[in-house]
Image: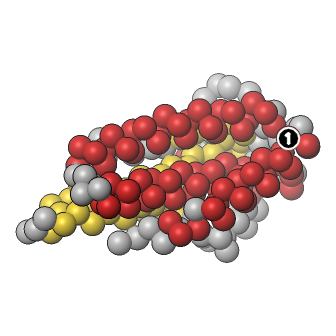
């Protein structure tokens, strides 16, 4: 018997950051709408930002919607869980006519941070499984904890880089996230 586990909410973190527009055709249909699944080969383009209007009133030249979550099922006594990390094209907006490469790089790093938290989630799933504590309650508790941490981390990134306008800080964050992703490379294959 298969039974699906679904988180009580799927993280859709809307970032108000600087972004641009480019070429089309990479967004795939998901249950949430069109999205790009994170891979190291695919980098965001301005054409990936497809929302017609800004999602909120805060000052920004763009806003991105990216999130991580999981899908799972129970087969007998075994729980199988797959993690996903996505950029939601139809929910991501950019100021018409605005384009700047360093801003797009800043935006990409937000997506990369999302990937980092997808890997942290999968690392936590492995730890729960090793302790024989992987169940719906503990999985949801892990997810909720990481969502809170993720929100604070993304806010800190924007604050310290001032949305890409502080070049030295942006460079430090680029290096930090690259190193963190490398450190968690063993948890990059998170589809079970």
**Residue drawn 91% across and 43% down?**
167
Residue 113 image offset from top left, x and y in percent: 63, 51
Query: From the image, which quarter does the C terminus lie in?
Result: bottom left
Residue 92, percent from left and from top: 61, 47
**Is residue 8 left or right of 22 when viewed as pictured?**
left
Q: Nearer the viewer, residue 74 or 33?
A: 74
What residue lies at 72% left-to-right and 38% top-to-bottom? 157
95 vs 99: above or below:
above
* The residue positioned farthest toward the front in the image shown: 131
Percent x, y of residue 54: 64, 36
Could one spot residue 161 in this view of the protein? yes
Identify the residue at horizontal 53%, vertical 37% (top origin). 149
Rendering coords of residue 166 (x, y %) = 89, 37
- Image quadrant holding the N terminus, namely bottom left
Q: Nearer the viewer, residue 162 or 101?
A: 162
State left or right for residue 145 relative to residue 17. Answer: left
| Residue matched to label 1 | 169
Element assignment for label 1: helix
Q: Residue at x 58, y 55 (%)?
A: 116
Q: Quadrant of residue 72?
A: bottom left
The colour style of the image is secondary structure
80 versus 115 height, above or below = below
Res 60 seen here? no
Front-lying residue, 25 or 121: 121
């Amino acid at each position: 018997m298969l039974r699906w586990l679904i988180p009580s909410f799927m993280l859709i973190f809307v970032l108000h950051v600087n972004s641009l527009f480019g070429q089309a055709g990479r967004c795939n249909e998901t249950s949430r709408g069109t999205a790009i699944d994170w891979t190291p080969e695919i980098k965001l383009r301005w054409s990936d930002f497809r929302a017609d209007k800004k999602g909120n009133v805060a000052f920004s030249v763009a806003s991105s919607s990216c999130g991580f979550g999981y899908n799972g099922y129970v087969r007998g006594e075994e729980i199988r869980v797959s993690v996903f990390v996505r950029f939601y094209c139809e929910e991501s907006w950019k100021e018409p006519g605005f384009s700047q490469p360093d801003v797009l790089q800043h935006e990409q790093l937000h997506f990369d941070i999302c990937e980092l938290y997808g890997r942290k989630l999968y690392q936590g799933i492995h730890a729960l499984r090793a302790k024989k504590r992987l169940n719906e309650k503990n999985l949801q508790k892990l997810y909720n904890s990481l969502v809170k941490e993720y929100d604070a981390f993304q806010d800190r990134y924007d604050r310290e880089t001032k949305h890409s306008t502080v070049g030295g800080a942006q460079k430090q964050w680029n290096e930090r996230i690259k190193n963190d992703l490398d450190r968690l490379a063993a948890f990059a294959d998170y589809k079970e």
